[in-house]
């Protein structure tokens, strides 16, 4: 059997300047620059062995490029979320059509809310941030949907940032990169923890693709720290979409195809 790695992506919307913002003040986003940076990101995904599947653009949905929030993709099921921001719920349809080719689907339903950016997979554990976007009902529904597939769901309190994965992501299978000001590292049990450089609080969002990590150029001190732990980085410029509160995990859904 040939197993290939697939990354689902979606173009930057022409209306990106009207994106949702929670913790950042609105600043002008250069659409052409955002598109060029998104191209570089997609090249990085391809270099790391991903085949890209592009969901059709949704120019009327400002945040559509952030496909991560629409679904949680596991080996044997994909859970379509119910985004906490009402303006983002229309994004699901296109992503669902793409995912249906690869996984059976399950759905989070009203009154639950859940954003994919709040869900961090470590082995068979799903850590889920309790945030303004993901509520307790969302966490409970996710638990019920994934338990039959052998996954354990643990809720984690998050403060000071948008999503759990703004505060912590995996850089190796059992190694997390985190900002301990935004999330309690003890919540993650016995995993190795690399703390971001204190001068780079936004540096915890990294996208692990097997033994490599796609990582923003904007955080050189934390990058150096990661390299000192032997982590191989593929650096990209992600500064325009960072103004929309998006990071490198947000712009793709990576899954093993078969
Ligand atoms: C939002 O607020 O929903 C978007 N402007 C940013 C979403 C970023 N997504 C993510 O961190 N998973």
Image: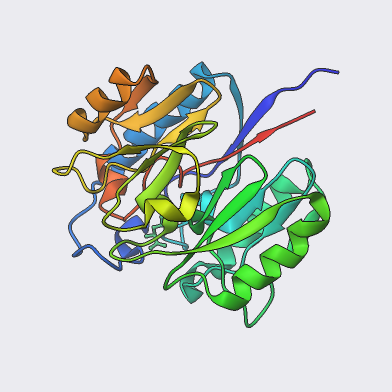
Q: Residue furthest right?
A: 1
The front one of 155 and 50 is 155
Quadrant in the picture for residue 124: top right
Residue 62's spot in the image, x, y percent? 41, 60
The front one of 29 and 219 is 219
Quadrant location of the C terminus? top right
Tell me if 148 is positioned left or right of 180 in this view.
right
Tell me if 94 is positioned left or right of 223 in this view.
right
Taking the spot 80% from the left edge, 17% from the top edge, the residue there is: 2
Residue 50's spot in the image, x, y percent? 59, 24
Image vertical order of residue 12 relative to residue 91, above or below: above
Image vertical order of residue 205 relative to residue 24, above or below: above
- Looking at the image, how many numbered discs can be counted on the residues? 0
Splitting the image into four quadrants, where does ligand 1 fall? bottom left
Q: Residue furthest left?
A: 199
Residue 72's spot in the image, x, y percent? 63, 52
Quadrant location of the N terminus? top right
Taking the spot 35% from the left edge, 56% from the top edge, the residue there is: 16
The front one of 89 and 210 is 210
Residue 36's spot in the image, x, y percent? 33, 33
């Amino acid at each position: 059997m040939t197993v290939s790695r697939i990354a689902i992506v979606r173009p930057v919307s022409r209306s990106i300047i009207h994106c949702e913002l929670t913790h950042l003040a609105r600043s002008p986003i250069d659409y052409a620059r955002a598109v060029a940076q998104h191209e570089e990101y997609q090249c990085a995904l391809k270099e790391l062995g991903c085949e890209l599947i592009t969901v059709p653009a949704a120019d009327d949905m400002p945040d559509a490029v952030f496909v991560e929030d629409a679904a949680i993709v596991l080996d044997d099921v994909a859970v379509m979320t119910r985004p906490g921001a009402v303006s983002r719920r229309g994004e699901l349809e296109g992503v669902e059509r793409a995912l249906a080719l690869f996984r059976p689907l399950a759905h989070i339903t009203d009154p639950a809310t859940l954003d994919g950016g709040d869900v961090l997979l470590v082995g068979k554990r799903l850590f889920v941030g309790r945030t303004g976007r993901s509520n307790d009902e969302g966490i409970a529904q996710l638990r019920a949907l994934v338990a039959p597939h052998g996954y354990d769901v643990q809720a984690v309190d998050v403060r000071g940032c948008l999503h759990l994965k703004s505060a912590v992501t995996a850089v190796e299978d059992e190694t997390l990169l985190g900002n301990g000001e935004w999330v309690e590292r003890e919540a993650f049990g016995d995993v190795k923890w690399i703390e971001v450089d204190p001068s780079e609080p936004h540096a915890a969002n990294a996208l692990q693709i097997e033994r490599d990590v796609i990582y923003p150029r904007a955080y050189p001190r934390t990058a150096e720290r990661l390299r000192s732990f032997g982590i191989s980085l593929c650096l990209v410029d992600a500064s325009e979409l960072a103004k929309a509160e998006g990071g490198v995990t947000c712009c793709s859904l990576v899954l093993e195809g078969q």
